[in-house]
Amino acid sequence: MNINDFITKVEAEFEDVTPGTLTPTTILKEAFTWDSVNALIFLAHVNVEYDVEISANELIEAETVQDLYNLVESKMIITA
Amino acid sequence: MALFSVPDIKISGISACVPEDVYRNADYDWVEEKERNTLIKTIGVEQKRHARKGTTTADLCIDAAEKLLELLPWERNEIELIIFVSQSRDYIIPATAGLLQNRLGLSHSTIAFDIGLGCSGYVYGLSVIGSMMTTGRIKKALLFTGDISTLNTSYRDKSAFPLFGDAGTATALEYKVGASPMMFNLQTDGSGYDAIIIPDGGIRNFAEKDTSFEYQKINEGIYRNGFNIALDGIKVFNFSLREVKRNVHTLLEYAQSSLEEVDYIILHQANKLMNETIRKQLKQPEEKMPLSLKEYGNTSSASIPLTMVTQIREAMEKSKNQLLLSGFGVGLSWGSVLLETDHIICPEILVHPNS
């Protein structure tokens, strides 16, 4: 997994995100509707794609795309 | 782990009934259009059925049962056992199963009782009714499942209101030596009791005039009182994505079977995102895992038989099917069953008219 690949896949999941607009420093709340429905879509995506489980509290702490990536990556290391 | 097999029981008929009123989520004006569209797309519920006050789950189950009794070569006095699986009973006391026995004109030697489960209720119900029939050599029995959830749901709760629909079902079972065994894997984690909860009105939080009826802001777009269903979406979501596939794989291992041998996998209809994610986890094609969410929403313990009736009725009536059914949610309670159906009675979905 690398961050560019991660971003491409995340962009494809959300309807209100134009592909190619997210960067590692993008602030989630400013880029799109980062609400509970989109949180579930993200959880479902990373569950299928990377086989990781993220809690509500962990998601709330993530501010940027990089934070999300780090969160997923940390889970993958633990389960590997 | 509760893995077990119930021999000599066959399903003879399945019927489902919904209330007449259709609620379209496009009309849900508590949230703005853009959010509403995302919501509808994500949960996959375009419309669902809403019962009017005064109609109960038992009323829907009665219609479903009467239709089966009309189509099956059964005498009413042959029915010795009925079980009502629901979380929306007619009264706090007594049990609703007794009312069903009386209204259906069944004999006084009928065993009748309720089971208080929701999403996992159909699978649990099959296990209890099947086990009792096998050990007691009970020839004919009816399993009722369903809920009226919409009356307990707050309109001003976007996390719950668009999701739930009302339905009641009846399943007819017979004792038949040599019938293919039903194989179960049932599980529970009560630490998650508050993930889906109606907190007030039971004995723990007795109904209080000053507090139970008061609406509180829980979150943006979410207002509820103590009698409303409270749903912790992310908790239920993570639980389901973690446990359902494990439960299914353990059952398949126990049954020395595989998903290739299964014709249809019918999941509890939780919401589209959840069901589709589980489908991807199980690596199965869409046509093998039919959904009824679009037209009926999440109908609690009715969702599995309702999906069979509305999505694969022809296959149920005209062929032999290997089925894997899996229910998961409120409790937290979950379970799966592998079973075979063989040319069963499966009438088209019934509509309970408004009186």
Image: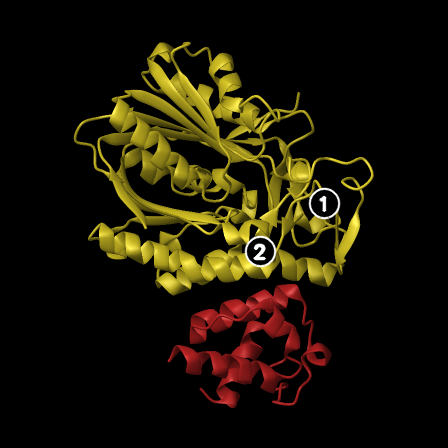
Residue B65 visible from this viewpoint: yes
Q: Mark 1 touching mark 2, by CB under 8 A? A: no
- Residue A41: where, in percent of width, then height? 56, 67
- Residue B226: where, in percent of width, then height? 72, 43
Q: Which chain is red?
A: A
Q: Amino acid at mark 1?
A: Ser
Is B165 on the left or on the right of B301, as rendered?
Answer: right
Q: Colour of chain B?
A: yellow
The mark nearer the N terminus, 1 or 2, is 2
Give the class, few, some or many, for how many residues have Cα within 10 Å of label 2's Cα (few <14, many ≥20). Answer: many
Is B141 on the left or on the right of B66, as rendered?
Answer: left
Where does the C terminus of chain B fall, quadrant-wise?
top right
Q: Height in image: B294 above or below B92?
A: below
Q: Please give the residue where the numbered disc 1 appears in the rendered image.
A: B154
From mark 1 to mark 2, how far is it between C-alphas? Answer: 17 Å
Q: Residue furthest left?
A: B178
Q: Residue at x 51, y 79 (%)?
A: A72
Q: Quadrant of residue B339?
A: top left
User: Are marks 1 and 2 in one subunit?
Assistant: yes
Q: Please give the residue where the numbered disc 2 appears in the rendered image.
A: B43
Is B250 on the left or on the right of A77, as rendered?
Answer: left
Chain identity of mark 1: B
- Residue B159: where, in percent of width, then height? 66, 54
Q: Height in image: A9 above or below B268?
A: below
Give the class, few, some or many, for how many residues have Cα within 10 Å of label 1's Cα (few <14, many ≥20). Answer: many
Circle on res. B16 = none
Is B161 on the left or on the right of B9, as rendered?
Answer: right
Helix or strand or loop: what does disc 1 sit on?
loop
Q: Amino acid at mark 2?
A: Ile
